[in-house]
Image (spheres, rainbow, N blue to C red):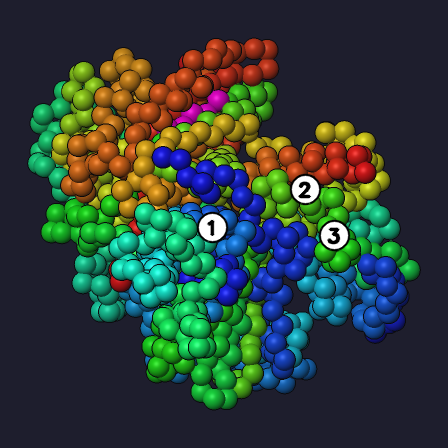
Amino acid sequence: MKRDIDGSVSVNMGGAEVGQGLRTIVRQIAAEALKIDPERVRVYNEIDTQFSPYEWQTIGSMFTTQGGRAIVRAADKLIAILKSNASQVLKADVDYLEYDGDYVYLKNDPDIRVAVKDINRGYITEDGITIGEMAQAVSDARLPRYSNPDKNGQGSMGVSYTFGATAAEIRIEKKTGKIIVDNFASTFDIGQVINPKQARGSVTGGVLMAIGATLYEKLEFSEEGKILNPHYFKYHLPLFKEAPKQSVDFVETPDAVGPFGARGVGEHSVIGPAPAILNAIYDAIGVDFYEIPVTPDMVKKALQTRQEK
Amino acid sequence: MIEKISFTINGKSVTVEVEPEMLVLDVLREVLNLTGTKHGCDNSTCGTCTILVNGKATKSCNLPVKKIASAEVVTVEGLAKGTQLHPVQKSIAESGAIQCGFCTPGIVMELVGLLGEKPDASQSEIENALNKHLCRCTGYEPIRDGALMAQKLIKDR
Amino acid sequence: MKYKYLGKDYNRPDAINKVTGQAVYLDDVRLPDMLHAAILRPDYAHAKIKRIDTREAEKMPGVVKVVTGRGCTFRYGDNIKDQVPMAIDKVRHIGEPVAAVVADTFIHANEALAKIKVDYEPLPVLIDARDAMKPGAVLVHEDNGEYWHLPTLKPKQKTNIAHEYHLLKGKGEKGFEDAEVVIEGEFNYPLASCAAIEPHGSIVWFKTDKTIEVWSSSICPFIIREDLAGSYGLPVGDVRVHTPEIGGCFGYKSDITVEQTIAWIASFVPGRPVKWVASRQEDFTSTLIAHGIRTKMKIGAKKNGKLVAIKTELLHTTGAFADTGVNVTIASTHNSAGPYEFDHCDLTGYTVYTNTPPVGAYRGYGHQESQLATERMMDILARKLNMDPLALRELNLLTEGKVNALGERMWKTHGDITNCVDNIKKTVLSKPMPKEDENYYYGRGVATVMKSPKGAPF
């Protein structure tokens, strides 16, 4: 995390943006931690192992929690450097000083202050000598207490949890057995929501992926092991008209680990749809299915069997 | 047999020397170095290759280049004027319709084509147009919102 | 707590790049003097390679080199080193790389590919984990057990079991003695694909200064860097990996996938970058696929709905290589208890070699596969106990203080699932819904879910 000469900030991390909106929340979390407007935070556009800080895999819905925590810790270090530079200028010990984004000032007299712009690269004294450190900081974070399984296969292997509840409303076309998902509702407790539009977009996308798994998607293998449908359309991804109306709500119980109490949600949306829809099928026609995808043919056959009974 | 084929691309005249059966998508990406149009599948089902040919949204992955001789072709690179975005681009960018962005150029071109021809397109026509594009990220809702926003912006102009 | 910049809809900073086509994805990267690779896939999903004749292919226009796996002496993998960059003496799945052509254009490379002749000796093909577990089944990896693997993994030699994971909580299966009602079921979440709209692709450049530079549609550049440095005997700092804009990942670009193969190919044409982008078919057959988990579950409860014991047996059709799938098996197994407290758990997961493409991460990482079973079983149990399905769940949810299958105690700060359930009740279930009309049957179903991340080993 670097503070540039005009007080704006550049943030460089190893976390990969894949569409989930990582770049946006890096900006917001850095802004909150540094008390400056997100417009003044520049986020990296590319990862290059020569320059980027180390990151394992950007997976597990962990980046908000872990990456966010690294940002907050780096911001704390950066602020400490600014205070250290300022203490020389204001001639006061660091613990007398406060930081508000653009100024470092004396706690009990805010008018006694120095602008962050003037101490980003140290401080130039009257005679042209620069003292102090550059406002740059590096930090990292990992999931605390993460462990291997013990002899019982148990252990601290989860650490951070996101819980949720989901519901599906479907309709089954009598003539064809086609299943139409009319509504899908998801409620997740993701702690402090950082960007509501993006969080919602993550859930709506994940729900549709799982609806794909529930109703359409399966790799078909011949007996010889050839994949028979390795193309779009034959391997059917849900289309616009197959998307349900979705309602997405978030509960905000602050997390212990994540920045400002935020928690991840990138993957959680894909878990509910398959069982919720299969449970809804039982509610509609009294038939239990035990595997997916549930195709119109399977439903028609089940309806016929039910009729015969 | 290599042939000379001429057309206009984003307002500029251009002549390429290629096999007449070469696909327009490959001509755009490999010969003209316009990489904004994407290659997402091999059986014309994903829509990421969509461009405008004489104002109409057209897939470029199954179109031999000889078919665009003398045509007016527009790709996503031809929409913005300097830093000023086309209203469709502005709306799609601001509505949450973009996550990974790979389906975005194709959808933008589809909407520019539709709303260019029919600014009063019905919601149903807009939805039919969106139904031709695969998106794995968004669940489609915000893309529809962006499309309706774009329509409003275009009509208010 | 009110925050100034959180809880607000700031627009993504890359929106304009993406909407103008200026964002650079892997296939948009062009380097001077770049070569193109086309990769030959096998005619069989399981076969010994007797002979590869590349002479005719080498003479085709534009061809610079034709590459096979002969001479490859290393295996790679972060959990189990069972992977090879190109098939050496046998092929194990229909998408495996057998040979490759490097040429000046992609069209020339593809045309030459058709001229490579391979003689195979077909072997029996295993598609389903259940068949691969049968005694006497052909071995996908004859050396199973002899590969380097993490000390926590347990391969069973002379079988197709790459890992067997057990979890025991409380009395395990003996816990069913305390149950008053027991139900069983078997569920399948079949093999599928992340199918991101941007296919995989990689550019690898063995440079004249003996460093390696890589561009890849991958989200683990540091893993690629360390893996390639290890395989080619270079200091880690001499391998440089770039991640351009990525058109969707969903998991199957989060492990090292095609990069080792492209590096192997590029190592034969040092000094020039080699680019390969998957065709849509190759993206399905030759990268990583998903799921393939069959869950057998037994749940025991008291008549009042209090859950007592769960026994899960999970078979994972992990495919030809288990390195990228083994952790999915583990996560799916211990999370099969779902968001509930069971006093007694006996959970087993098998990572099984088969002749299908290798399975990797898919958004959800093992949770949706086994929780399909859990959430269906809860509804079936509710029916048997004559209870409302949500009420049954609410009696057992992992709220503060409860202990999950892993032995972790839930904190308040893990989240409030009861609140989530209440919200669903309020916003969905309280509204009336028709049961049937002339054309349709209507139905409603619920599921409560949980997920935890997979932590980095270092």
Dot 2: few (<14), some (14–19), or many (≥20) neighbours within 10 Å?
many
The answer for which chain carries disc 1 is: A
Q: Mark 1 points at which residue?
A: A36
The residue positioned 55% from the left and 38% from the top of the image is B139
The answer to which image quadrant residue C277 occupies is bottom right
Nearest the eye: C51 or B1? B1
Q: Where is residue B105 in the image (x, y as percent from the top left)?
A: 68, 51
Residue A86 inside the magenta-drawn segment: no
Q: Mark 3 points at which residue?
A: B84
Dot 1: few (<14), some (14–19), or many (≥20) neighbours within 10 Å?
many
Q: Name the residue under label 2.
A: B91
- Camera-nearest label, 1 or 3: 1
Q: Does residue A178 appear in this view?
A: yes
- Camera-nearest label, 1 or 2: 1
- Secondary structure under the numbered disc 3 in the rendered image: loop
Q: Position of residue C61 (x, y in %)?
A: 68, 82
Q: Distance between the residues labelled 1 and 3?
A: 28 Å
The residue positioned 32% from the left and 37% from the top of the image is A254
Q: Where is residue B102 in the image (x, y as percent from the top left)?
A: 60, 53
- Camera-nearest label, 2 or 3: 3
User: Label 1 sits on what residue type?
Assistant: Ile
What are the residue bounds of the magenta stretch? A165-169
Report if the CB atoms under discs 1 and 3 are less than 8 Å apart.
Answer: no
Q: Does residue C346 appear in this view?
A: no
State the quadrant of the C terminus of chain C. Answer: bottom left
The residue positioned 46% from the left and 27% from the top of the image is A185
Nearest the eye: C328 or C431? C431
Residue A106's place in the image compared with A136, above or below, is above
Pointer 1 and pointer 2 on the same chain: no
Residue furthest to the right in view is B70
